[in-house]
Amino acid sequence: MMRPIVAIALAIPVLLLSACVSNPVLISRANGLVEELRETSLTCAAAHACAVDSPYQAIAADLLARSNEHAAPHAVNLLDAGEPSLALRIHLIRAARESIEVQSFIFANDDVGIFTLAELLAAARRGVRVRVLVDQLFSIDNRELLAQLARAHVNFELRVYNPTFDEAATQPLEFAAGIICCFLKFNQRAHNKLLLIDQRIAIVGGRNVEDRYFDLDSEYNYRDRDLLVVGVEGRVMRRSFEAFWRHERARPLAALRDVAERIVRAGRDPKPRPAPSMRHAERIALASARADDVEFIRNTFATRHLEVARVQYFSDPPHERVRGSQPQRVEVSQQIADLIGAAEREVVVQTPYLILSDPGREAFETLRKDHPDLRVIVSTNSLAATDAFPVYAISHKHRRLHLQKLGFEIYEYKPYVGRSDAVFKFNPRLSLFGSARALGGRHAVPLKRTGPRRGLHAKSIVVDAEVSLIGSHNFDPRSHGFNTENGVIIWDRSFAAALRNSIMTDIGPNQSWVVARKPDKAILTPINQTIETISEKIPFFDIWLWRYATSYELRPDCSPLRPSDPRFHDCYVRVGDFPEVNLSAKGIYTRLITAFGGGLAPIL
């Protein structure tokens, strides 16, 4: 019997060879069937006649009327809560009169994905031009569904960005073959997130189209954040979308071989697909009802909008982005570094992954030299909360750099709201090597207690309580060197105060642990720091176990203090390097990755 590793070794060259063989006859037949079968009838005499009444269309009309070459006022809303934000998205889709553009890194085939697709198709059928661009790696891989979407309506088109071997679904062997044959191309993803309505109303931020970004998953949800922007900057967003849409890596569904096969197989009489079932039908129904409730939209969002004088949308171009490439290919990273570099008093950062890109680290190093008293507050994931434990392990490797050299105040997000004093018993039913689904996230570690958990996914910056940034960029090497990213910068003190308050709430004692330096122990402290410094500089090995810092929990009888406060250790109790994590998992999941994974930081 052939061993699995041998079978894989033999299969990969076959996959590579087959991937290079195009089938123009198949693609031509699929395109012909799509053109012939796509629905053309409309449900409305005019798209705007069937659009729901929206206060945001009125706000947009007023702002555009007041915009000129000297002034461009915009309306903005901070979108923190998941479920209400889903209702707002659906409301805006239903309010569209001319066009809808969607970009997403993940577009899942779950309740939120099915719900969103149905609304986009309904908009197309009433006359709105709908275009959806998704990155292939983690988006819809149901080939039958994609074949149905390809011929759904003349006003609806979905394209897939950077498909592996020109297919919608990537099988495990194809995944391995893609890494071996074309690593850089395979690893470059479109991480942008955008919902653009009529070129003037947009949502930009961290949320993908998936249940867990809107608090609908029963096991693991993200604490995320988006920004709603209304105004002429929507035209800039449209130009960016067009660049991606027309790029050679954005492939129509009928041009994907596995989808084309199903289109041709179904022929001119495709069987109707059964209506999809939903796991959270009641909550989706509530979101749908709220989307139609103009008073809910007005009271929850529209009346709370802020009018700001200056905003700027930024987006990387859809080109190859590799270290050492042309400067314009890291446009977003440079803008973020420039924003940080202009700080004088305070920088507040929220990111799921605390692995700084080179421009980010250099900006903070320069800041620390020029402004020794500048405060840098960082909100990020704990090991217990993250869905990417290998990435956390790399971050953990550089704690001393972040705390001592860069002067960060680091607050790590808890997987559950409330106190956590390590009194919960280990649940033996939770397998150490359980599936990612069972562990709550894609790459989450087992915890001491079961139940729904959460992780941080928001990406935001506030500088000097005056300038804000919200987008898709994680401020890490992958976002800098491989992904394309987008976001919005807002120059407004009131908005900066609202965003800062949101992040400061996330770092409160009930929401986060504090990472702080351990108390000095005479001569052992400088010896330990010297060895740790040497160990952390080695790219692939970091074997020193006695770390510079650990996690702390606020005592019930104390008020929050900064780690630099002399009374800090009187008011905080040490809860260990990895609070809430099953201790047996700590050594396996984190120490090994920290020891051998340092060089993987740009990829992870």
Image (cartoon, grey):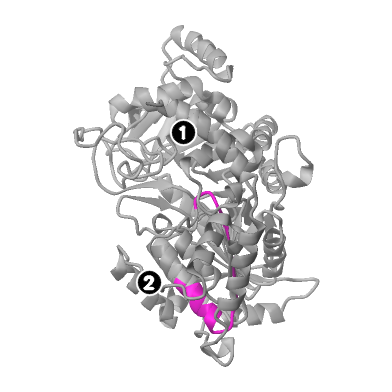
Which residue is nearer to you in this view: 598 or 130? 130
The answer to which quarter of the image holds residue 546 is top left
Disc 2 crowd, CA 10 A, few/some/many (<14, 14-19, 20+)? many
The relative height of residue 200 versus residue 207 in the rendered view (above or below) is: below
Can residue 76 be spotted in the picture? yes
**In the depicted view, which residue is nearer to us: 277 or 220?**
277
Q: Which residue shows up at 38% across the image and 71% down it?
A: 287
Residue at point 67%, 53% (across, down): 249
The image position of residue 429, as x and y in percent, is 19, 36
Of residues 47 and 334, the one nearer the viewer is 47
Q: Residue at x 41, y 29 (%)?
A: 4
Percent of width and height locating residue 291: 43, 76
Q: Which residues are magenta?
A: 118-138
Q: How many C-alpha atoms fall within 10 Å of the one at disc 1: few (<14), some, or many (≥20)?
A: many
Residue of label 1: 392
In the displayed structure, 61 sits above or below 377; it is below
Is 69 magenta? The answer is no
Q: Is residue 362 above or below residue 539?
A: below
Tell me, yes or no, whether the highlighted magenta stretch contains residue 121: yes
**How many numbered dots are placed on residues in this image?**
2
Amino acid on which the number 1 mark rests in the picture: Tyr
Residue type pointed to by label 2: Ala
| Left or right relative to 48: residue 596 | left
Q: Secondary structure at mark 1?
A: helix
Give the Cα distance between marks 1 and 2: 34 Å
